Image (cartoon, rainbow, N blue to C red):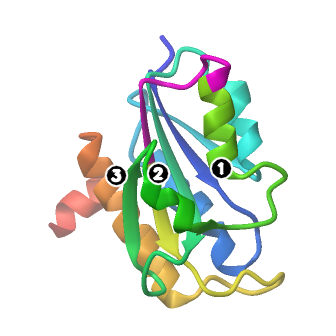
Amino acid sequence: MKPETMIAGIGSPHGDDRVGWEIANAIQSRTSDRASVRLVRTPDELLDWLEGIQELVICDACQGAGEVGSVHQWEWPCADLESISWSGTHNLSLLAVLALARQLDRLPASVWIWGVEVQQVQPDQPMSNAVMAGATSAAESICKALSIPQNETEKQHA
């Protein structure tokens, strides 16, 4: 049976822009059949995977929401999202893809966007420590929100 929740990490291999992928990978290591996890380079790739999805959790880099590494959560639609810059050079912006999915009647009933504030997205740069910490915090918060249990190593340290 296909999970009704999809977690989509949007990113690229360029510096802090990989934060969406890092969050999704951290969640994938903790979930089995509770949610499907996808790594995407551009938001328009989401349109291919929405069939049968009731809850969509999007993880992406953002700018303009706070200090570098800070974690933010929005339920879509939300007017506050208009003032946020999303990572990368996407052909269609994240907000445009969500609006298109709604027009095509393919939008899940629940859409959550988790953003981590980034600074540098240059090629051949590593993720900054602040953004890596934000990715860890975001993954924890998403797992709690979705009731995904801690993995075994985290349980031992808790």
Point out the stretch of residues depicted in magenta: 103-112
Residue toward you, 30 or 140: 140
Do the residues under discs 1 and 3 have CB atoms within 8 angstroms?
no
- Name the residue carrying label 1: 94
Tag shown at residue 108: none
Residue 102, percent from left and from top:
59, 26
Which residue: 34% across, 52% down? 142
The secondary structure that most of the magenta stretch takes on is: loop
Residue 39, percent from left and from top:
66, 48
- Name the residue carrying label 2: 113
Amino acid tagged 2: Ile
Which quadrant holds residue 110? top left
As for residue 7 lying within the magenta part, the answer is no
- Looking at the rendered structure, the secondary structure element under dot 2 is strand
Residue 131, visible in the rendered structure: yes
Residue 149, visible in the rendered structure: no
Residue toward you, 64 or 127: 64
Which residue: 62% across, 48% down? 95
Q: Residues within 10 Å of mark 1 (few under 14, many from 20)?
A: many
Please state if 154 lies on the left or on the right of 118 as rendered: left
Q: Farthest left residue?
A: 158
- Name the residue carrying label 3: 142
What's the CA distance linking mark 2 and mark 3?
Answer: 10 Å
Residue 32, percent from left and from top:
43, 33
Question: Looking at the image, is mark 2 or mark 3 nearer the viewer?
Answer: 2
- Looking at the rendered structure, the secondary structure element under dot 3 is helix
Do the residues under discs 2 and 1 have CB atoms within 8 angstroms?
yes
Amino acid tagged 3: Ile
User: Of the residues under marks 2 and 3, which one precedes in the sequence?
Assistant: 2
